[in-house]
Amino acid sequence: MAATNEPDGSAPHAEKPPPKPEGGPQPRASEGGLDLREKVDQMGMILAKGLDLAEAGVSLGVTIVNRIGSAAQQQVMERMAAAMQREAPPESAPSPPMPEAGEPPPAEAPAFYITNRLPLAPGGTVKVSFSINNDSMVAPKKVSLRIEGFQGETTGASLPAAAMSIKPETKAIAPVDFEKFVLRGAVPAETPPDVYFGWILVSSEDELRIPVRLVVSS
């Protein structure tokens, strides 16, 4: 078999130069490719910042919610479990009774919504922040926001939209960027404790409805 000579360490020896790449110098990436990678990296940074900044984020291209409340997470998990049970092979068990004719199906809560994190009491002040992302890499998007009134889930009491405002109401969002918005307002002192559902309407190329859930406790 072939033998290799090991250096004895007594004589200096020169290190071998690194091998030259075959086929000449490697071509540099095109400017277009660099721009695309930079934009993708920038989008990742923006979305990461949005997770820290906003209670909920909504994308105009594809609806994306960055953060949802624990109640909404529980609802999502319950729906996933129910879907898995429906896909499982049926067991030999008596079928549940059919609902009576004319009985409307129970209303499902939205899978995501904007909600207040801090406790809110009658006579208190609402301040809920959220962000809207622009997924386009080339075109800015101008958005206009308005509020639809709130109604109590249990009491049916109303929380008028006139008591609420969004700042800013209009904004142009740069490509691959986001803007922060704040829902502000005052809860009238006579408002009964309840969970109040309303909507934020976002108008751009299309109209997007963001569900809002304000929890007013005593």
Image (tube, helix red, strand yellow):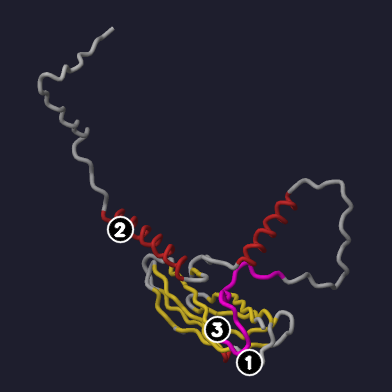
Residue interval drawn in magenta:
108-126
Mark linked to residue 44: none
Q: Label 3 is placed on what type of residue?
A: Val
User: Distance from label 2 to label 1 (Cα)?
Assistant: 54 Å
The reply to whether dot 2 and dot 1 touch (C-beta < 8 Å) is no
Give the side of residue 26 with respect to residue 195, left or right. left
| Secondary-structure class at tag 1 | loop
Q: Looking at the rendering, which quadrant does residue 40 occupy?
A: bottom left
| Secondary-structure class at tag 3 | strand
Q: In x, y percent, where is residue 39?
A: 35, 60
Image point (44%, 67%), residue name: 50
Q: Label 2 is placed on what type of residue?
A: Asp
Q: Looking at the rendering, which quadrant does residue 142 occupy?
A: bottom left
Mark linked to residue 189: 1
Q: Earlier in the sequence, mark 2 or mark 1?
A: 2
Decide: is 128 above or below 19: below
Q: In x, y percent, where is residue 12?
A: 10, 23
Query: Would you name the residue on which mark 2 appears?
Result: 35
**Dominant SS type (magenta):** loop
Residue 209 showing in the rendered view:
no
Query: Would you name the residue on which mark 3 appears?
Result: 126
